[in-house]
Image (spheres, rainbow, N blue to C red):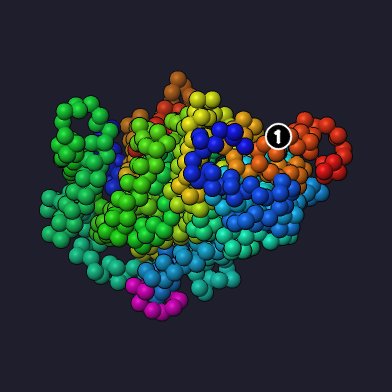
Amino acid sequence: MNWSNIITATLSAFFGVNAMYFAISALGLNVQFGYAGLLNFGQAGFMACGAYAVGMTAHYFGISFWWGIPLAVLYAVLFGLVMGVPTLRLRADYLAIVTIALAECVRLVARSVTFKKYFGGSDGINQFSGPFVDLSPWNPSAKYSLNPFAASTNLVGAILLLISYTVCSVLLGSLIADKWTYHQNVARRTKWVLSSVVTFVVILVLVSQTEYDGLSFKSLVVGWVLAAVIAALVFMLMRSPWGRVIKGIREDEDAVRSLGKNVYSYKMQALILGGVIATFSGIMFSVSRGSVQPDNYSRDVTFYVLTALVLGGLAKVSGSIVGPMLFWGILQFVDVFLNELTKSWGGEVRIFGLPLITSSSDIGVLVQIVIGLMLVFLMVFRPQGMFGNRKEMAIDGH
Amino acid sequence: MDTDDTTLSETARVARAALAGVAPEPGVSKPDPIMTAVGVRRSFGGITAVDVEKVEIQRGSITALIGPNGAGKTTFFNLMTAFDTPDTGQWAFDGKSLEGVAAHKTADMGMVRTFQLTKSLTKMSVIENMKLGATGQRGEKWWNGIMPFTWKAQERDIEARADSLLSRFKLDHMRNEYAGTLSGGQRKLLEMSRALMTNPKLVMLDEPMAGVNPALKQSLNQHIKGLRDDGMTVLFVEHDMDMVHDISDWVIVMAEGQIIAEGTPDQISSNPAVIDAYLGAHQGKSLLEDL
């Protein structure tokens, strides 16, 4: 078994493009579902808004690629309005039904033959992220690491990486310091500094093993910085009186309404804010590949994002960042591990004579099974997710 | 009315004096009404839940709304606070018509309600529950949310007000606990004090005593009387006749959606229509017939 291969692949997935765009999307879903309690099953639709906005600027509108970003925000706001206006006055389950249907509508319209001229049908739109790549100081065909001290990283990248690692470790350190309830004679600040430093070192050790090609690398640096900025904004919003109203709505709409808050408007704000965040996830994913295909924005994406979010912990900003990392890290680990195992066992894995893996296609299925099992165990032993609040979970509805 | 007038506070004496000359009959006009409802009707399918010809609530008084289960008291509350809309009728608060006014705007106008099934926001701390109640918060605009300097000063004032209310209602020791860890009675107190954060003129309490132990009932009574002393008007729904008799200045009786009697607590407890409505005599007859 080639363990170094397994470790490199796992850690690369841990910080990889999938984890990055899932993290941004999960931040949006966290605003909607974790904080406001809006069961949005149409996150993929919002992501498609962003992806198609940047894809279509050159392909159809013939304008600069950069116009894609304001267009994406506009699409997401419109999509949120279309979703919210008819459903936000109704009970939560109606929102779930409508959102899943609308997201599917977006995908089906985008892949339809009739609108091939605009959206490129099921092939989508390709090779449009030129302007994004051109700005990159990195060579698309070379290999890079997220390790800021690696020889392949240039100075700008190294500084950006160090800043984002510092932000992450300070945020995570604050969280750990909160959980660090023993040693009461140690000041919280000391605990915070200590745990931040340890987190920083752990991150550096983890990233030192990663490896990406030039385009992914650029997307990762931009994407993770974006994720950090969005996380900081969400964090601040949720500590503000606005966040208090949003959390109140999750608990009991009528109580909040009786206190003079326009619940409908707040729900709409949360839905659209989460959608606009998700649209950036779509932008980052599509530019990282230079292509947009409708089937990348199917129902599965929404449910995987939701899974990753629950894994990390609802109503916690750190949960929506770490959840997707763990989700993709574990997925990749199981996949590569099983591949290596099959290779070293001579192409077949048998347990007690039962054929577990006889061809490489079995591995994909097994990965899904492992993910399912993992979720079951998570729900049984840690229903609040990695960072969720157990005390909060223990309080039932009313 | 209380025989021992010396136990009454100044505001109670003023409120009772103002109502002393009012005739004890359904739909009677009050000298200074804060809330009026005329011809308010609401039916659900074939059932007319509320059919109020006229009712006025005297400003600065404690008014009790009593009646058997299913009399339409809570529906009437919902109609007055825009949680539900009447089919017909005019209803106004403080001289302003409430027709077409959204539920969240009634709080800004100075009208706040609590719920029969207590609605504490269980996964938020007690102090967060309280701070949510304050109206006109700058930080509740999302664009201000990310700029703490726009709302920090206001937040400090709100927190100070919340803390003083919490200590008045003896919840200050639970300040940082989740509201979900409070007992049923404490939740009632929290809901009432949270409602007071909106600086209301009219407080509408839906069964404030339901599920509250006798000791806490006494202090709740004092709290409600305290609201009147602070210049607020109180309208409350209650089944506990002792409490109604103890604290209210005026009693309105509902049955089958209609107002069947009004008067001071003493007048009401000797009213045959009320006794019929509560005890269920004369079944099948119109309750207004005997009057």
Task: Answer with left or right where residue B215 lies relative to residue B155.
Answer: right
| Residue A84 vertical placement versus A96 (above, below) | below
Q: Is residue A209 visible?
A: no
Residue B263 horizontal/vertical position (percent): 69, 43
Q: Residue at x 45, y 76 (%)?
A: A60
Residue B273 horizontal/vertical position (percent): 79, 38
Task: Answer with left or right where residue A199 lies relative to residue A346.
Answer: left
User: What residue range appears in magenta?
Assistant: A59-67
B27 in the magenta segment: no
Q: Residue at x 75, y 42 (%)?
A: B255
| Residue B194 vertical placement versus A132 (above, below) | above
Task: Answer with left or right where residue B255 lies relative to residue A388.
Answer: right
Along the viewing direction, whichever of B223 and A266 lies nearer the viewer: B223
Residue A318 horizontal/vertical position (percent): 32, 44
Q: Residue at x 62, y 30 (%)?
A: B242
Q: Quadrant of the C terminus of chain B?
A: top right
Dot 1: within a 10 Å radius of its alpha carbon, few (fewer than 14), some, or many (20 or more) residues?
A: some
Along the viewing direction, whichever of A182 and B161 lies nearer the viewer: B161
Chain hosting mark 1: B
Check the image and name the residue furthest to the top: A352
A64 in the magenta segment: yes
Q: Main secondary structure of the magenta part?
A: helix
Give the residue type at disc 1.
Ser
| Residue B9 vertical placement versus A78 (above, below) | above
Along the viewing direction, whichever of A239 and B284 lies nearer the viewer: B284
* Secondary structure at numbered mark 1: helix
Q: Quadrant of the N terminus of chain B?
A: top right
Residue highlighted by disc 1:
B269
Q: Is residue B205 visible?
A: yes
Q: Residue at x 35, y 42 (%)?
A: B163
Residue B27 horizontal/vertical position (percent): 72, 52
Check the image and name the residue furthest to the bottom: A62
